[in-house]
Image (tube, rainbow, N blue to C red):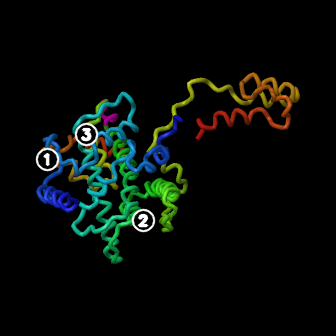
Amino acid sequence: MAGSGTGGDHANYGGSSDGNPAAAAGQCSVREQDRFMPIANVIRIMRKVLPTHAKISDDAKETIQECVSEYISFITSEANERCQREQRKTITAEDVLWAMSKLGFDDYIEPLSLYLQRYRELEGDHRGSIRGEPLPTIRHRSPNPSTDVVPFFPQPPPPSFVVPPPSGPPHLNHLYGDGAGGYYYGMYGGGDGSGASTSQDPPMPGFDHSYAPYKQ
Amino acid sequence: MRQAGTYSAILSGGVSGRTGPHSLPLARIKKIMKRSGDDVKMISGEAPIVFSKACELFIEELTQRAWMMTLQGKRRTLHKEDVAAAVMATDIFDFLVEMVSDSNGTQMAPATKSNISVAER
């Protein structure tokens, strides 16, 4: 059963290995399913980073779909060469990460290492064994890793309401004492009426905490 | 909640479910890996896992860069030419140049090319 499936794969591949993958795109119905990621998954990921009003032409979808396959092959070839140099037979996750780093995708290493780490933890829960291979510790080119990750993900929208300037209440707090501070604290919705009793906590940090997600 | 998406797939079926609705199919990834060379012998189970996330990052980056080209052209539809322009303008996408440039014999418009050089470099 498995043998016949593999044989079919090879025959398929041999028939079109030297052809331009884009040529197959012209005849959608004849596209070889096994050579590409499912188009629906590709589109879903594309939509995730595009504004809602954006439209995507069919040829753009197919092009990206083809690019993904090319990307996998490109990275795998490099990883495979490394395995052969080191006379190993199995391409590991570390080989893949190493190849990505070598081929310029350094920015992917950190999120991917984290992803793999999480996967191993979850697998460890299920199987009771975690492969202890250390992850490659490849550093980012930029000193601040967080700035490298940011461009890949959309920024959160700004809050739709105006945050009151945070200068007033602390100032008044000093002028009028704890009671006034508690009053203002409660007025802005930062406390539940207990503001006056916790006089050692200045009221404004409540603001900072509430809006911390918008500031990062 | 609004920020979900970066790593949340890990917890919501992406990895734990292995073939959850939100991940790229691992079997397909493995097939494509095997086809990248006759001498590819064995593939660790974790390698497609890494690729499933890597492909996601790759699609996101390529799409965003292509969309920048769409916006430069003051359009709202992302076309293949935008993907091609993004590939041309990005060093790490050099391996895709042949793939995006020679199909149907249509190269990207010269105007698009000049736009890239101004914008990216």
Q: Give the range drawn in magenta.
A: B70-75
The mark nearer the N terminus, 3 or 2, is 3
Query: Is residue A106 visible in this depiction of the protein?
Result: yes
The mark nearer the N terminus, 3 or 1, is 1
Who's the residue at 54% across and 30% down the image? A158
Residue A184 inside the magenta-drawn segment: no
Q: Which image quadrant for residue A192?
A: top right
Who's the residue at 14% across and 55% down the image? A12
Q: Is mark 2 on a helix, strand or loop?
A: helix
Do dots 3 and 2 share one subunit? yes
Residue B71 inside the magenta-drawn segment: yes
Rate crowding at label 2 as few (under 14), some (14 to 19) or many (20 or more) other CA atoms within 10 Å.
many
Q: Give the percent coordinates (x, y) of residue A170.
A: 79, 31
The residue at which mark 2 appears reads as A94
Total count of labels: 3
Rate crowding at label 1 as few (under 14), some (14 to 19) or many (20 or more) other CA atoms within 10 Å.
few
The residue at which mark 3 appears reads as A60
Query: What amino acid is at disc 1?
Result: Ala
Question: On what subunit does the disc labeled 3 rest?
Answer: A
Q: Give the percent coordinates (x, y) of residue B106.
A: 15, 43
Query: Is residue B121 visible in this depiction of the protein?
Result: no
The mark nearer the N terminus, 2 or 1, is 1
- Separation (CA) of disc 3 from disc 1: 14 Å
Do dots 3 and 1 share one subunit? yes
Between B49 and A71, the one lying in front of the other is B49
The residue at which mark 1 appears reads as A23
